[in-house]
Image (cartoon, helix red, strand yellow):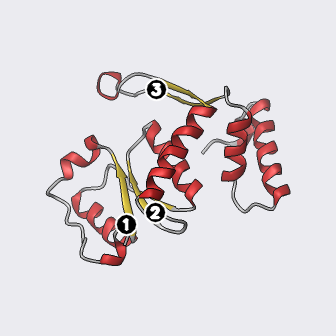
Amino acid sequence: MADLGSLDTPTLALLEEITGAVAARGETTLIPGLFRHLAQYPGLLALAWTALRPSVEGRALARAANVVAREATRLAAALARLGVKRGDRVAVHTGLRPETGFAHLALYKLGAIAVTLSQLYGPDTLAHALNHSEAVALITQDKAWAPLRGEAVIDTRSEERRVGK
């Protein structure tokens, strides 16, 4: 996590503006204020990512605030159509990728709880985390999940833990 003392003045001012607006509205989280500011500053650079291994992970990526907000909102809507709702736990197994940020923003927008799963987890640890987290859904990427197919034993018998049930 960044030390606030190391942030530049415009970034600190924007952070203070967001937190002040959230407090003034009596909101209990930063997420509504964050999405309001993403809409207010649509051209502001909101995401910059550079692949550690470009030949494997693709090239660098930069996204403006309106694109970040749109992608997070689209994912939130898709998760809601699947039955994910406020208070539900959703496992996120995506690694250090831009999609991880979109997933977290989407979940927070829904009021869902992100259960972050490390890509360093082996099949047994991953199965344990998924079986005991009460996650109703899993957001993953094929490269992360492919090596685990057939390895992890996930308990899908519990009807009340399935999305949409």
On the image, which quarter does residue 17 sit in? top right
Q: In this figure, which residue is indicated by the disc labeled 1? A: 163
Which labelled disc corresponds to residue 50? Answer: 3
Is the residue under label 2 in contact with that under label 1 (CB below 8 Å)? yes
Q: Residue 15: x percent and y percent?
A: 75, 42
Separation of disc 2 and disc 3 at Cα? 31 Å
> Given the image, on which type of amino acid does mark 1 rest?
Val
Indicate which disc, 1 or 3, sits on the residue closer to the N terminus. 3
Q: Residues within 10 Å of mark 2 (few under 14, many from 20)?
A: many
Indicate which disc, 2 or 3, sits on the residue closer to the N terminus. 3
Q: Residue 159: x percent and y percent?
A: 30, 77
Q: Is residue 131 left or right of residue 72?
A: left
Between marks 2 and 3 in the image, the one whose residue lies nearer the viewer: 2
Q: Residues within 10 Å of mark 1 (few under 14, many from 20)?
A: some
Q: Residue 20: x percent and y percent?
A: 83, 50
Q: Is residue 58 left or right of residue 156?
A: right
Residue drawn at (46%, 26%), measured in percent from left and top? 50
Residue in the foreground of this view, choosing between 76 and 94: 76
User: What kind of element bears circle 1?
Assistant: loop
Is the residue under label 3 in contact with that under label 1 (CB below 8 Å)? no
> Given the image, on which type of amino acid does mark 3 rest?
Thr
